[in-house]
Amino acid sequence: MITDELVSSVEAVVRETADEEVLPRWRRLADHEVTRKTGPHDLVTVADHRAEERLTTALTALLPGSAVVGEEAVHANPATYQVLRGDGPVWIVDPVDGTRQFVHGDPGFCTLVALAHGGEVLASWTYAPALGEMAVARRGGGAYLNGEALRSGGPGPDEALEVAHSHPDFTTDAQKHALLGLRAEGVKPRPCGSAGLEYLNVARGTLDAVAFSWESAWDHAAGLLLVAEAGGGHATLTGEPFRLAGGNALPFTAARDAVTVRRILSLLAHAG
């Protein structure tokens, strides 16, 4: 299913879509082009909708018989998320990951696309158009940023772990409590920005780990493969792999190496 031609074609589609539907609207959004979905911090823009519609058309044309699970389509019809439980190939799409950053004129946003089959992510594309960064991962084929191989490495034994976690603005009281374990000696926690870009930071070794308390596949699918192919790992609170279709024990973590995964899970398990 995953050929060199398909990987290159998807990269071209992602670049073209973000460059034509997202980037031209950055720092140029009119008030009526920004709305709220479920709360004051949960923003959506015309760029999200236009980019997702365009990606949906282009990606399904590249792989006939495939389906799309996109953030905005699932918001409109939550039942479409169940496609992830089916037998066919699924494109998982976040047209603008980091919409709040995008709306506020910050360059820290990206477009995320992943291709999954049978609950396994086969390939992923992370494109930050304002930063000029394209990261591509292929299961068993490595992870690359602008054509250069990514290696996550591991933190030094005496270094404080830098961990990006679910932003307080997007977490419930129970989720905040679950992340309290990160307030430990030798750990430097901070709220995350774009989830996709935080995963990229782990993959290139500039961030030690992420810890998230929500499981929307469009935020995590691309990044989890990127980290894995760069040499890192991940696990949910019970030590099991993250399941795209949901039902995970939360929080979960992705980190630069297996040792750090185990350390973060230990901290999360003893939160509060």
Image (tube, grey):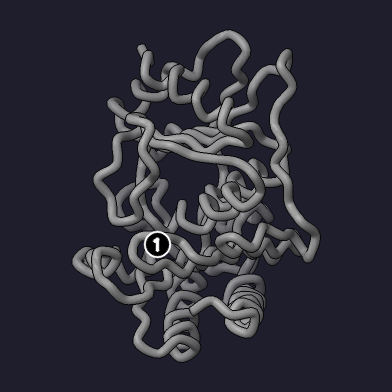
Residue that mark 1 sits on: 35
Quadrant that contains the C terminus: top left
The relative height of residue 65 versus residue 152 in the rendered view (above or below) is: below
Residue 135: give x, y in percent of width and height. 67, 61
For image coordinates 70% across by 26% down, the residue present is: 155
Q: What amino acid type is highlighted by mark number 1?
A: Thr
How many discs mark residues in the rendered view? Answer: 1
Viewed as shown, does residue 12 lie left or right of 93? right
For image coordinates 34% across by 50% down, the residue present is: 243
For image coordinates 61% across by 50% down, the residue present is: 197
User: Within the image, what quadrant is residue 173 found in?
Assistant: top left
Viewed as shown, does residue 267 lie left or right of 191? left
Which one is nearer the viewer's eye here, 109 or 218? 218
Describe the element under mark 1 as helix, strand or loop: strand
Q: Is residue 16 visible?
A: no
Most extreme residue toward the top is: 185
Which one is nearer the viewer's eye here, 192 or 246? 246
The relative height of residue 272 versus residue 19 in the rendered view (above or below) is: above
For image coordinates 29% across by 65% down, the residue present is: 84
The relative height of residue 262 versus residue 123 in the rendered view (above or below) is: above
Most extreme residue toward the front is: 140
The relative height of residue 186 versus residue 18 in the rendered view (above or below) is: above
Residue 176: give x, y in percent of width and height. 37, 26
Residue 258: give x, y in percent of width and height. 56, 32
Residue 230: give x, y in percent of width and height. 66, 49
Most extreme residue toward the right is: 148
Q: Is residue 96 visible?
A: yes
User: Within the image, what quadrant is residue 163 found in?
Assistant: top right
How many other residues sit within 10 Å of disc 1, few (<14), some (14-19) or many (≥20)? few
Which one is nearer the viewer's eye here, 33 or 272? 272
